Structures are given as structure tokens and as C-alpha cells.
Amino acid sequence: MERIDSIKMFTQAEVADILHCNKDNVTMLREAGVLKAIKTGRSYMFSRMELEDFMNRYAGLDVSNLNNAISSLAVVESKKRLEDYVSS
């Protein structure tokens, strides 16, 4: 049963409530590639793990608009490449 709880999925409205923003901001983050989702029919669902990863990866970064989100994505990807390089 614990495995099922770990894969709980959230709607876009629920994610907006969790992140204290509006649904349009969640859409922008998804479209920018900052927040990954699964398309289910006509809507998108977000996993608990993705939300936790998002909050850890983007802590301290500004993702309040598209330009900032894209810049923050570049920072996160750069950190990931550096971590991969150092660990290899």
C-alpha cells in the first residue's frame, strides 16, 4: 500500500494550491519543461515525486514567469551536468 501512496497524482488545480500560485503558472511551468507532467486524456497529472523533486531542484530560484523559469531551468540543468561530471 505504501507504494500506491508514493505515486499519488495531483491535478493542475491541486498543484496550484500546493505551490500557492494559479493554474496558469502551473501550465507555464509545465510548458517550459520545469515541472513534468503526464497527459491523461485532456488534462495533465503531476506525481508527488515530481513535485518534491521540483521543490528541491528549484529551491531559491525564481520561476514566477516564463523568462525566469527558463533561466532557472538552465541553472538546474547546469548543476545536474556538473554533478554528473564530478561523479564520473
Image (cartoon, grey):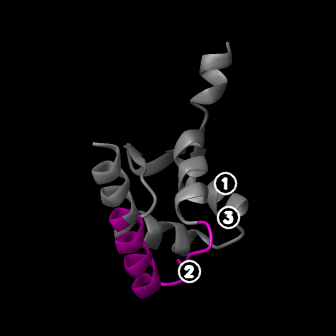
Please name whichever residue, 54 or 60, is drawn nearer the observer in this view of the structure.
60
Q: Report if residue 72 lies within the magenta region.
A: yes
Q: What separation in Å lies between label 1 and label 2 (alpha carbons)?
A: 21 Å
What is the secondary structure assignment of the residue under circle 1? helix
Which amino acid is tagged 3? Answer: Leu
Q: Earlier in the sequence, mark 1 or mark 2?
A: 1
- Range of the magenta residues? 59-78
Which sits earlier in the primary sequence, circle 3 or circle 1? 1
SS assignment at label 3: helix
Magenta residues, dominant SS class: helix
Does residue 57 belong to the magenta stretch? no
State the residue position of label 2. Answer: 62
- The residue lying toward the viewer, choosing from 86 and 35, is 86
Q: Residue 77, position in %: x, y? A: 34, 63
CA neighbours of label 3 inside 10 A, class few (<14), some (14 to 19), many (20+): some
- Which numbered tag is attached to residue 19? 3
The picture quadrant where one finds residue 78 is: bottom left
Mark 2 or 3: in front is 2
The amino acid at mark 1 is Glu
* Quarter in which the N terminus is drawn: top right
Query: Residue 14 has which mark?
Result: 1
Q: Residues within 10 Å of mark 1 (few under 14, many from 20)?
A: some
